[in-house]
Amino acid sequence: MNLILKINSQNLAATLIKPEGFKKPLPGLIWIHGWKSNQNGNIKRSTEVSKLGFICLTLDLRGHGQSQGIISQYSQKDHLEDIKAAYKYLLENPDVDPDNIGIIGSSYGGCLSAVATNYLKFKWLVLRVPALYVDKYFDVPTEELIGKDEEGKAFRSSDSTPEKSLALKGVANFKGKILIVESEKDEIIPHPVIENYLKFIPDKRKLTYKIMKGATHSLETENQEKEYIEILKNWLSEKNKELEIEV
């Protein structure tokens, strides 16, 4: 179902995918795409995941896809507000269990998802090839930041700390389960960035860490896409069992 969410009088394009045959309320998942991407890939992924008994909400961040706004105007701080609008929608949806909402983000969206855990109550956190920005750039328009940063240091911080990064603070304090997915051949986010996330998760028992062999940053082949969907489904099916979702 196509939706329009409102954020500061602007339209935020979103899609709600609800499974059939399950007893409601059901757990919810918010899906956040990467920089200069859109929700289309997440619609395909969430359609498969929803069959496990999850209500999925995908969206186009402002300046992306079908959402309003000029991309050059928006910072991480602005896009965090988009996530808050999506969360509010799920929280107020009677079909969604408000105590069981998760977030799944890739690349830029992965960093934003980790940041969002500082402000919103999530049960699960999935980060695929997450970028890592430091807080001093939080309210700088992201396009301006990337345009001035030819080496990618602004979003590839490999030596930051939770005191300097809301994303690292988020994973360090997160109480739920975390899945981190790395691409072995990632040409955008190098391994030390992933290591930086991993080292600040204090309880490794709540962490699942997967490396997709031979995969690139954007999952360029159908086989890579299928592998990622299977990783999500296998991990989330365990959460499904924990919640004892009823058919």
Image: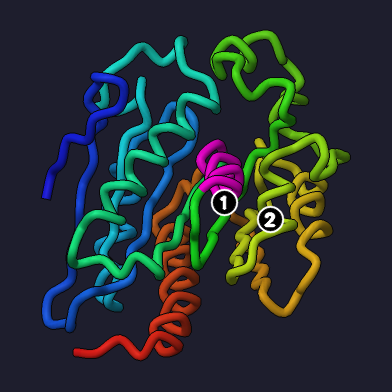
Q: Mark 1 points at which residue?
A: 117
What distance separates the C-alpha of mark 1 from that of mark 2? Answer: 8 Å
Q: Is residue 107 above or below residue 142?
A: below
Q: Which colour scheme is used?
A: rainbow
- Is residue 112 magenta-colored? yes
Can residue 216 be seen in the rendering of this structure?
no
Q: What residue type is labelled 1?
A: Thr
Position in image of residue 160 (x %, y %): 84, 39
Q: Quadrant of residue 84?
A: top left
Q: Is residue 244 above or below residue 200?
A: below
Which residue: 27% across, 73% down?
26
Left or right? Give the position of 166 relative to 52: right
Q: Earlier in the sequence, mark 1 or mark 2?
A: 1
Position in image of residue 143 (x %, y %): 54, 15
Q: Name the residue under label 2.
A: 171
Question: Which secondary structure, mark 2?
Answer: helix
In which quadrant is the C terminus drawn?
A: bottom left
Which of the labelled discs sits on residue 4, or is there none? none
Q: What residue type is labelled 2?
A: Val
Q: In this view, does 6 lie above or below 85?
A: above
Left or right? Give the position of 13 relative to 49: left
What's the magenta region? 108-119
Question: Which secondary structure, mark 1?
Answer: loop
Observer-nearest of 216 and 70: 70
Disc 1 residue crowd, few under 14, some 14–19, many 20+, Cα 10 Å: many
Is the residue under label 2 in contact with that under label 1 (CB below 8 Å)?
A: yes
- Is residue 27 magenta-colored? no
